Amino acid sequence: MFKSFGHTYVLLPFSAPRQCNICGYTGKFGHAGLYCIRPDAICMSCRSTDRERLFVLYLQKWQWAPEGKSILHFAAELNLVDRLRPRADHYTSADLFMASADVACNIENIDCEDRQFDAVVCFHVLEHVDTPKALRELRGCSDPVERRF
Ligand SMILES: [Zn+2]
């Protein structure tokens, strides 16, 4: 067992040490998920998830640069906010419930101008909402050339 940020993680005995591409931590990672366990998903130092580290890897490998772009980030993960906000020309975090979000916004009814944003970053949200409705809203507010996520 390992405690971090008030959560208890079980470190699987067969886990091998890994390195976090966000904070540089090297060691065993915790697993995530209640019903479908993802081994080695949580960095025990910065608490980043596997999908956050994958997105950072995507930014690094494919050199998708937020510089000069306006980005709308739903359910903003703090590890990604730190990477996107300082580099984007215009960055807006949005969430219906998160007090730290720049705007309180329902992904099924986004109040913005057509194609106001170059890109939308959105992880782990669509499975919790009316997906076709949310995708229509995301298409309406983002540039079709930059639409990747
Ligand atoms: Zn980390």
Image: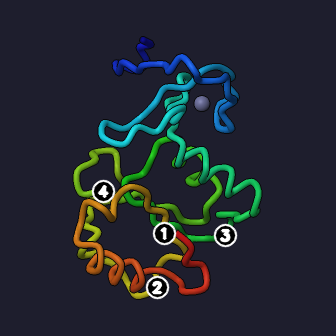
Query: Which sits in the foreground, 38 or 52?
Result: 38
Circles 2 and 3 in contact, beta carbons < 8 Å = no
Residue type at numbered disc 4: Asp
Residue type at numbered disc 3: Gly
Label 1 – label 2 distance at C-alpha: 11 Å
Q: Residue at x 42, y 51 (%)?
A: 76
Q: Residue at x 27, y 45 (%)?
A: 99
**Which numbered disc flags the more N-terminal residue, 1 or 3?**
3
Q: Residue at x 24, y 65 (%)?
A: 129
Q: Quadrant of the N terminus?
A: top left
Is residue 47 rendered to the left or right of residue 22?
left
Task: Give the crowd class for mark 1: few <14, some 14-19, many >=20 residues within 10 Å.
Answer: many
Up/down of 33 relative to 24, above or below: below
Q: Can you tell me which quadrant of the image ligand 1 is in?
A: top right
Circles 1 and 3 in contact, beta carbons < 8 Å = no
**Residue 144 point in image, percent of width and height:** 54, 86
Q: Which residue is mark 3?
A: 68
Q: Which residue is mark 1?
A: 120
Residue type at numbered disc 1: Val
Image disc number at residue 115: 2
**Residue 103 point in image, percent of width and height:** 32, 59
For numbered disc 4, what is the local secondary structure? strand
**Residue 100 point in image, percent of width and height:** 34, 45
Up/down of 74 relative to 111, above or below: above
Q: Foreground mark, 2 or 3?
A: 2
Circles 1 and 4 in contact, beta carbons < 8 Å = no
Is residue 99 rendered to the left or right of residue 139?
left
Label 2 – label 3 distance at C-alpha: 15 Å
Image disc number at residue 95: 4
Task: Give the crowd class for mark 4: few <14, some 14-19, many >=20 residues within 10 Å.
Answer: some
Is residue 61 rendered to the left or right of residue 36?
right
